[in-house]
Amino acid sequence: MLFETFAAGGCRSYLLACESSCAAILIDPELSLVDRYRGEVQHQGLCLRYIVDTHTHADHFSGSRELGRVLGVPIVMHRLSSAPYADLRLDDGDMLVAGSLKLTAMHTPGHTADSMCLIMENRVFTGDTLLIEGTGRTDLPTGDPNALYDSLFGRLLRLPDATLVYPAHDYKGRTNSTIGHERAYNHRLQRPERADFVAMMRDLDLAAPTHITEALRTNMNGGKTVTQLLSEAARKVPFMAMAELRSRLDNNPSEVTVLDLREKEAFEAGHITGARHLPRGQLELRVNTELPDPTAKIVTCCEFGKISTLAAATLRDLGFSRVAALEGGTTAWREAGYPLEAA
């Protein structure tokens, strides 16, 4: 069997392949490594049969959808996953076959409702259910400490002690563990009583993962990331430098309309002199009444320059051909020493 581990920060993903047939399975791919996966598959001459996500990830962006689209490979998840792009949904006990590879799904809810582990011969790919000397957290959407207790003590810990453990995350550079090692040294597994384990998990008080909202929205619904949306929007619109806007407002303010897209409280606290207020959430509803001339020169602004870029692209799509986005935002405008007025 060909076997390779990929690491991106604390994320771990795994490429397995049958040597005789070159059929392969990729587990828990991370979006930033998509080109590396494709390169390795091509370099090894593999035929990728399945791309598997062991659960809906909250702490990074899954690469499954992008890889599945580019390579035409089915995406596999548990049947409880909400991801609309999953092509094959597994039940507990279902098996994936790729050449001589046989991976059996074990439903292990707790970290998420759709968490599953994949068992193959002497190893188990545990996703975020069981980590090396740790476990997945249970305080994120669909997490349940009672379910995690059952998944760990009622299922995973009943595997043979020699079973190799390959988790979806490790932040200390470790590659794998064993069920026996985890049983002996994993401090979270030293609470064999349900009530003690559940109380411990509920008292962890962990910080929320970075980009959790964006990651969950993307991984659960198949939407584009904010970064992708911004990149696409930036290709559609020109930008205006702060100094250029300041000069135009000083010399001939009637030639440009500054459109402030922030919420009312932020706008009233301080905005560019003469700016018109139109919150981003109301843009499409009010655009025809607030901006009746599609040929007018408009500069969108927000706090940091991201929402204004998206809004400028939307206005261009709606036929406002002379829209530009302010480079930066009102925060940068203020830091540059340019004046703001309060409502």
Image (spheres, rainbow, N blue to C red):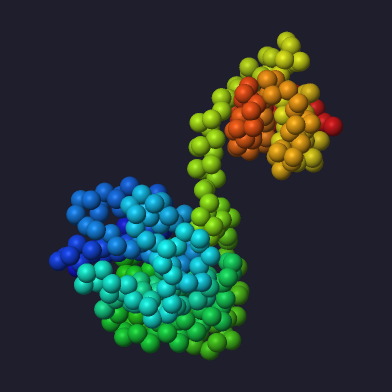
Q: Name above or below for residue 329 compared with residue 121.
A: above
Residue nearer the viewer, 15 or 266: 15
Q: Inspect this view and state whether residue 156 appears.
A: yes
Please identify the quadrant where the C terminus is shown: top right
Q: Residue furthest bottom?
A: 193
Residue 248 percent coordinates (x, y) = 69, 14
| Position above or below: 273 against 76 | above
Q: Quadrant of residue 117?
A: bottom left
* Residue shown at the point (58%, 61%) measured from the top left: 207
Q: Nearer the viewer, residue 109 or 135?
A: 109
Image quarter hosting the N terminus? bottom left
Residue drawn where x is 28% and y is 72% of the image: 97
Q: Is residue 321 left or right of residue 161?
A: right
Along the line of sight, the residue nearer the viewer: 160 or 133: 160
- Quadrant of the image occupied by residue 317: top right
The mark total stands at 0
Q: Name the residue rendered at 34%, 58% in the picture.
A: 73
Residue 8 visible? The answer is no
Residue farthest to the left? 20
Task: Give me the residue at 35% from left, 85% from top.
Answer: 159
Left or right, 266 with respect to 124, comes to right
Q: List the single residue furthest toward the top.
A: 251
Where residue 95 appears, x then y in whole percent? 34, 76
Residue 131 lies left or right of residue 58; in this view the side is left
Rendered location of residue 113, percent (x, y): 53, 73
**8 w.r.t. 268: above or below:** below
Q: Quadrant of residue 75?
A: bottom left
Residue 67 at what x, y percent from top left?
37, 53
